[in-house]
Amino acid sequence: MRTDVILLRFGEIMLKGRNRARFENQIVQQIKRVLKPLAKAELHKESHGRMYVELNGESYEEAQQALSKVFGLLSISPAIKVAPELAALQEAALVEMNRYPEKPKTFKVSVRRVNKQFPHDTYEMHDLLGGHILQHVDGLKVDVKHPELELHVEIRNRDSFVYSKKVAGPGGFPLGSNGKAMLMLSGGIDSPVAGYLAMKRGLRIEAVHFHSYPYTSERAKQKVIDLTRVLADYAGSIHLHLVPFTEIQTKLKESCRDNLIITLMRRAMYRITEQLAEKRDALAIVTGESLGQVASQTLSNMNVIGRAAEIPVLRPLVTMDKLEIIPIAETIRTFPISILPYEDCCTLFVPKSPSTNPSLKVVERQEAWMEWLPEAIREAVEKTEIMLIKPEEKSEEDHLF
Ligand code: ATP
Ligand code: MG
């Protein structure tokens, strides 16, 4: 019997060492989650760590699309599963050779024989399969050095697999396998990309957004909810913390030097995010900062701002150009939301010439004068609203594209 399956491959780090069982658990959870809408698809595990999805009539394209959201998956292959018997393998080899519209002129067969009981050794199998294909497919030649198509045959104990295509997966680490961090999520282009890269590196994230209602609108808030929803596609759900920042921003504006307001605002944001991190058992802050991109992201500002938090601040985009960031935003589909015009809280308070080289001493002195600040920070943390954001349900129409 021939069965359509998808073979799954994982990064090396996942297959070795002490963390293997934990990594495997985490990735299995994610695979099962993304495959849920494909009700008949089933995840199987062979001995020796080979995992595959049995499609049972579900569409390969939809399954591939779903699996592209699972971090830790290195690559996948659409494959045919048959019993480890010569006749079945020969038949599957022909099916695979004729499966795709582009017809190769040259090919080679690569056999992996895990099942040592199988009556033919690897060399015999090359001949038995290669010969059978040459006999039944016209216009084909063997080329062992640069074949247009490489037919892979894996002979295992219970089943064997035949495939010829490899599709890259998203790579990275299984979600949550490296712990949890708080993502500072503005409505801009950069921070959603930073959140995606953090998740790809195995971090579960919770998003933190600072809003300055009524200076910022409901629509600006909706934009951040929508961005979180897109990111939630990779995680199942994401908590979004909405921090009321109006009071702190207004008071800072009244009481500090105009060119330092951004630096002081960011320090307050870091402090609030750090307190939220502690409450939520997260060990780091993730931001969308990129070195030198704007005045507040000079090394000098990063130094002064970064010192406001004691936990690590991770900046996945720190060395990237805007031209490298935008294609990622487009691929993960946050870009069209990010470029909607609704202002986030900072644009309203941007001074004419923000300092690019603030003095830590001056900044600390200014903060020391602001006796109200620690209490205002505590209050902002207390009044933070938490939402649980889930991915958008796929409607029938979505499936058309
Ligand atoms: P982005 O495109 O992510 O908005 P940016 O290039 O506009 O970034 P800044 O506005 O200087 O840069 O913000 C730097 C980082 O600070 C952001 O990437 C984000 O992580 C964080 N941040 C800025 N504003 C907010 C906000 N209102 N709420 C949460 N985090 C914010
Ligand atoms: Mg911004």
Image (cartoon, grey):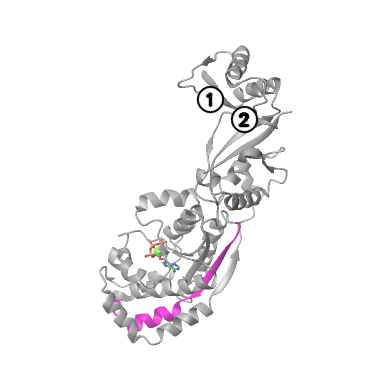
**Structural crowding at the residue carrying mark 2, measured as other residues with C-alpha within 10 Å and reported as few (<14), some (14–19) or many (≥20):** few
Three-letter code for the amino acid on which mark 2 is drawn: Val
Which of pointers 2 and 1 lies earlier in the amino acid sequence? 2
Does ligand 1 reach within 8 Å of label 1's beta carbon?
A: no
Residue designated by label 1:
150
Quadrant location of ligand 1? bottom left
Q: Position of residue 70 (x, y in %)?
A: 57, 49
Badge 2 marks a residue whose secondary structure is loop
Q: Which residues lie in the magenta part?
A: 236-258
Alpha carbon separation for disc pair 2 and 1: 19 Å
Q: Position of residue 29 (x, y in %)?
A: 63, 52
| Residue closest to the eye, 313 or 38 | 313
Tell me if 362 is positioned left or right of 28 in this view. Answer: left
| Residue closest to the eye, 162 or 15 | 15
Q: Which mark is residue 29?
A: none
Q: Is residue 50 visible in this depiction of the protein? A: no
Do labels 2 and 1 touch, CB within 8 Å? Answer: no
Q: Which mark is residue 114?
A: 2
Q: Residue at x 44, y 60 (%)?
A: 191
Q: Position of residue 166 (x, y in %)?
A: 54, 34
Q: Residue at x 57, y 28 (%)?
A: 164
Residue 355 in magenta?
Answer: no
Badge 1 marks a residue whose secondary structure is strand
Q: Which quadrant of the rendered structure holds the N terminus?
A: top right
